[in-house]
Amino acid sequence: MAAALEAICFPPEQAASPTTIAERMAHYADHFWLIEDEGGTLLALVNGLCTNEPNLSDEMYESPTMHDPDGTWQMIFGVATAPAAQGQGLATRLLRTVIETTRAHGRQGLVLTCLDDLIPFYARLGFADEGLSTSNHGGVPWHQMRLTLT
């Protein structure tokens, strides 16, 4: 389900493959946040690992073993909403849940990367734009966004 939603929401070079999603789920299933409809159809998801590294690197996308359950930073890899469910605030709801969960675990904060057009969306949730990331995931320039909690 998660891989299918990624494939719909992201270009092939950016979407996590079914194998990558399965490996992530095996290592940190509790760091997948989902919203499903009454019939069990996945409408939105957020996922990512925890680490003591302060910056999101391309290696993290492909190496689920980098997850540290006691890590100080929650990295966010994917924020995806099914096209038919967009505009209903589902991604915002999930991200607020992730922020509160991260806070409850006493982590320093959250880090994600996004394209230029999504900077205002994440800024409304309290993330600060740190400029261009070193990440070249999918061959495009990304902005690193950080929400510091402590």
Image: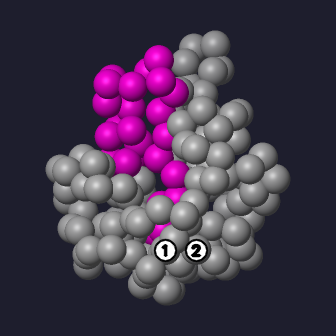
Q: Are marks 1 and 2 in contact (CB under 8 Å)?
A: yes
| Mark seen at residue 58 | 2
Q: Quadrant of the C terminus?
A: bottom left
Kindly identify the residue that appears in the image at 65 percent across and 38 percent down: 7
| Mark seen at residue 135 | 1
Q: How is the image coloured?
A: one colour
Residue 13: x, y in percent?
63, 53
Q: Could you tell me the amino acid type at mark 2?
A: Asp
Q: Is residue 148 visible?
A: no
Which range of residues does the magenta coloring cover? Answer: 74-97
Q: Is residue 99 visible?
A: yes
Q: Could you tell me the amino acid type at mark 1?
A: Ser
Which residue reaches farthest front? 139
Residue 17: x, y in percent?
74, 50
Above or below, 64 relative to 66: above
Kindly identify the residue that appears in the image at 40 percent across and 65 percent down: 142
